[in-house]
Image: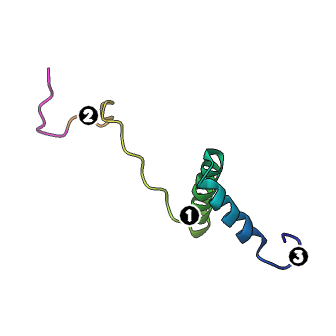
Amino acid sequence: MLVTPGPGWVVILLGLGLLAAEFVWARRLMERIKREGTRIKDTVLGKPEPPKPEDPSRPSAQGPAPGEQVPS
């Protein structure tokens, strides 16, 4: 169905969805397809990636705010 007119990719994705209900390898593949599809969609539409949260264990590069007490 991929080389002839028809819903080839839709059938493949539906089949993978059914397999994902039973098998871990299919679930991982389905999650990866969703993740990569979202990444490609965001790249094409120009949506920025959400900022990554800062690591609270690392000190800030800017230093303390004015008037903020620094623990000794």
Q: Please tell me whether the stretch drawn in magenta is mainly helix, strand or loop.
A: loop
* Residue at figure coordinates x 68%, y 59% from the top left: 16
Q: SS of the residue at dot 2?
A: loop
Q: Is residue 67 left or right of residue 54?
A: left
Residue under numbered circle 2: 63
Indicate which label's residue lies in the foreground, 2 or 3. 3
Report x, y in % for residue 22. 61, 51
Report x, y in % for residue 30. 62, 55
> Eyeballing the image, is 2 above or below 31?
below
Residue under numbered circle 1: 42
Report x, y in % for residue 34. 59, 58
Report x, y in % for residue 31. 58, 53
Image quadrant occupied by the N terminus: bottom right
State the residue in front, 57 or 14.
Answer: 14
Quarter of image, res 64: top left
Residue under numbered circle 3: 4
* Label 2 packing within 10 angstroms: few (<14), some (14-19), many (20+): few
Q: Which residues are magenta?
A: 65-72
Q: In the current view of this chain or complex, which residue is farthest to the top?
A: 72
Residue type marked 2: Gly
Q: Sequence order check: which comes first, mark 2 or mark 3? A: 3
> Eyeballing the image, is 59 above or below 6?
above
Q: Examine the structure image and report whether residue 66 is included in the region drawn in magenta.
A: yes
Q: CA distance from mark 2 to mark 1?
A: 34 Å
Quarter of image, res 59: top left
Image quadrant occupied by the C terminus: top left
Q: CA distance from mark 2 to mark 3?
A: 63 Å
State the residue in front, 48 or 26.
Answer: 26
